[in-house]
Image (tube, rainbow, N blue to C red):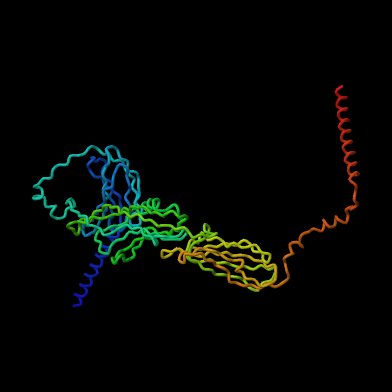
Amino acid sequence: MRCATIAMKKIELKSLFFALLMIQGLSASAQQIHIILGPDEIGENQAWTVSITILNDQLKTYGGFPEIPGFRKRGTSTQSQTNINNGQVSSSQSVIMTYGPTQQGIINVPPFSIKVNDQVVNSPGKKVKVGPPIQVQARDPFRSLFDTRDQFGDSRTETEFVDIKEDALLALSTSKDEVFVGEGFTATLSFLVADNNRAPMQFHDLGRQLSEILKKLKPSNCWEENFNIENIEGESVNIQGKGYTQYRIYQATFFPLNTETVSFPSVGLEMIKFKVAKNPSFFGQNRQEDFKTFYSKPKAVKVIELPPHPLQHSVAVGNYQLDEEITSTELKTGQSISYTFNIFGDGNISSVERPVIPKDEHFDIYEPNVQQNIRREKGRISGTKSFKYFIVPKEPGSYDLGKYFSWVYFNPAKKQYDTLKSKTFVTVEGESQRNQAIQSTDVGSFYDRIELTDNTLQSASASGWVKTSANLFIVAMLGLSIFVVVRKKR
């Protein structure tokens, strides 16, 4: 019995040793990624391919195939293969982009790179000669009777693919259909996929497409606050009782600058839409890549002029509130304090101007330091704009800062103008500083000269005699100069 136990342990150790060898063999054949280009020469009626093949790993992600001048993309297909040779297992997966030539001649395929499984793979490119169409031999009707390879899933067996009708759409929506000049509204471009959709799709070359879409979409008569969507994630929404997954592609809040209607044209988004195999198999290709462009409907937002007001063309529009900060309400003349006028709420924070401060002999109020903070979240723009002032009181007394600090805006919810006014009261003590500027000016030298100046009145005739004497002296000197010049010439 003991011998049998020892024998069993030896068998288990051998099995474990064999399993370790198998694992070492698999790790030795680590993943390899290759880009394989089609033949050097094809006929005008033949297809040319670019294949991404990965060995001993799964093909998880891959970037876009290159656009090649002279070729037109026709779609992708996938292949997978598993081999067992002398106890060693190897596998490969491929995705193949099929191109069709658009002309005869030499087509230059430039070098390119594709990111596969977070790894950049390079291809040197090549030159492909496209000749006249090649005549295809008719298929032998008796071949299938004698060639058994097609019956067992050979890769040359053609798979029939069908196009499944999708339940999806590209939609541009706005939070409001009518706004005042300067009032914000949010526009969202989304791709919506119904919960009962059966057609497999995925985004394709989204960065380039979005750049072209925004050139058409952004209105020229609006200030834009972009939400800068970086990660496109699905979100469950309900539209008219039907469930969808919403993928937000672009979102921004716009503030109209004039009464011109804000118009958004129809834009198109190309998606990869897969055809599926009519008779799917375990080892074969079960879907085929194709493309479909979805178009949004045009949209317009009406803009209304603000009611008449002296500040109609310069006032900010939004829902704002006031928050104040002051270092102290007990002040002394000649000593500076800081006062902050914080405007916060929903609206175009960038357009908020500082309050207009009236000139006053009781305070010196200096230009403010300005700080701005904008928040973009949940489809709305909000934030704070702070104006920090330094104030020097010049006269003692009690003062209402509301007479100095106030700010007018238009509230679109109430459809009326409103004012944010300071509610702070301060008390100033100390001596008056109103005449300090005059006293500090050095004017003593002027008054000193008064005592040294002769204040005796002189007659007008005496002044005239002095002028006459000066003129006679000048004439005499001029005559003498002429005499000297003439004498020298002789």
Residue in the foreground of this view, choosing between 416 and 425: 416
- Residue at image point 47% right, 58% down: 305
Q: Can see residue 262? A: yes
Residue in the foreground of this view, choosing between 168 and 162: 168
Q: Along the horizontal axis of the image, is 144 left or right of 484?
A: left
Residue in the foreground of this view, choosing between 83 and 480: 480
Question: Would you identify the image quadrant in which residue 165 lies?
Answer: bottom left
* Tag count: 0
- Residue at image point 89% right, 44% down: 463
Counting from the top left corner in percent of width and height, residue 140 is at 11, 45
Q: Can see residue 25? A: no
Most extreme residue toward the top, as rendered?
A: 490
Quick check: 464 above or below 388? Answer: above
Counting from the top left corner in percent of width and height, residue 229 is at 40, 59
- Location of the N terminus (image quadrant): bottom left
Q: Along the horizontal axis of the image, is 452 left or right of 211?
A: right
Q: Along the horizontal axis of the image, is 125 left or right of 160?
A: right
